[in-house]
Amino acid sequence: MTEGVRLRRDAQRNLERLMAAAAEAFRERGLQVPLEEIAQRAGVSPGTLYNRFRGRDALIDAVMPALVEAGVRDALARAETVEDPWEALTLYVTLVCELQAGNPALNDAVSRRFPDAEALTAICDAQMDQARGLLERAQRAGAVRPDCTAEDLAYLFWSTATIVRATAAAAPRTWRRALAINLDGLRARAAGPPLPEPPMTAAQVHRSMLEM
């Protein structure tokens, strides 16, 4: 084996170890786990990690998009089999929130705390577009108040992200209660006061997520 081939194989093994270690560490502790810990788990130096990925966002983009996309795609597929528009919408939102509750990395990803992870951000943007279709279908059926927008759904994911982090040790399922209360606020009512503020724009939602 030539020296060049050996070095390439070593580099590939290091890459595989880093990605496996990152996936494990992210799943256990979220996307803010120290990069030095990931390098240690992989059995490489921090310099090797930074040389390969430049920093945290690049590593997140290498590991997380496929995982997030698979979870969101499954949630959408299951929701689309539900005939009732309200039930379809609430199932989708609940399934995404279950992803958040069950995996600290997915919780960080859905709330988009790492804006420079471009591939992950694109998947999360697509997730909001999918939710928009379910919301509009429920509005056409008269099940959701007409002054709600897809951008309002971001509140559900943000609040779930915060509640999951705050209550993980004391009451790990209480996010379901909070979500049920919040979902009830989307229901169309025979009469009721208008919402006090206009909906956020997509740009405002994006900016807010970057500043969380």
Image (spheres, rainbow, N blue to C red):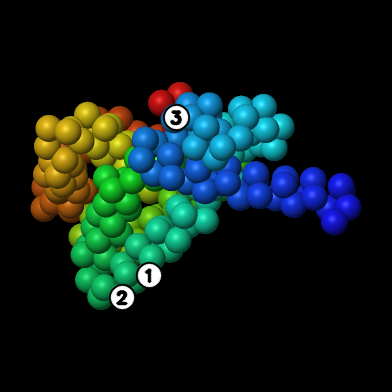
152 over 140 or under it: above or below: above
Say left or right for 109 vs 94.
right
Determine the residue positioned at 48% across, 30% down: 37
- The local crowd at label 1, few if under 14, some if 14 to 19, many if 20 or more residues have their Cα within 10 Å, is few
- Do the CB atoms of the residues marked 2 and 3 lie less than 8 Å apart? no
- Tell me residue 97's x, y (percent): 28, 49
Residue that protrudes farthest toward the top in the picture = 211
68 over 162 or under it: above or below: below
Q: CA distance from mark 1 to mark 3?
A: 30 Å
Residue underneath mark 2: 81
Residue underneath mark 1: 77
- Sooner in the amino-acid sequence: mark 2 or mark 3: 3
Q: Secondary structure at mark 3?
A: loop
Say left or right for 34 vs 154.
right
Instruction: Identify which residue, 201 or 120, lies in the foreground.
Output: 120
Mark 2 belongs to which amino acid? Thr
Residue underneath mark 3: 32
Residue 84 in view here: yes
Mark 3 belongs to which amino acid? Gln
Determine the residue positioned at 58% across, 42% down: 18
Q: Secondary structure at mark 1?
A: helix
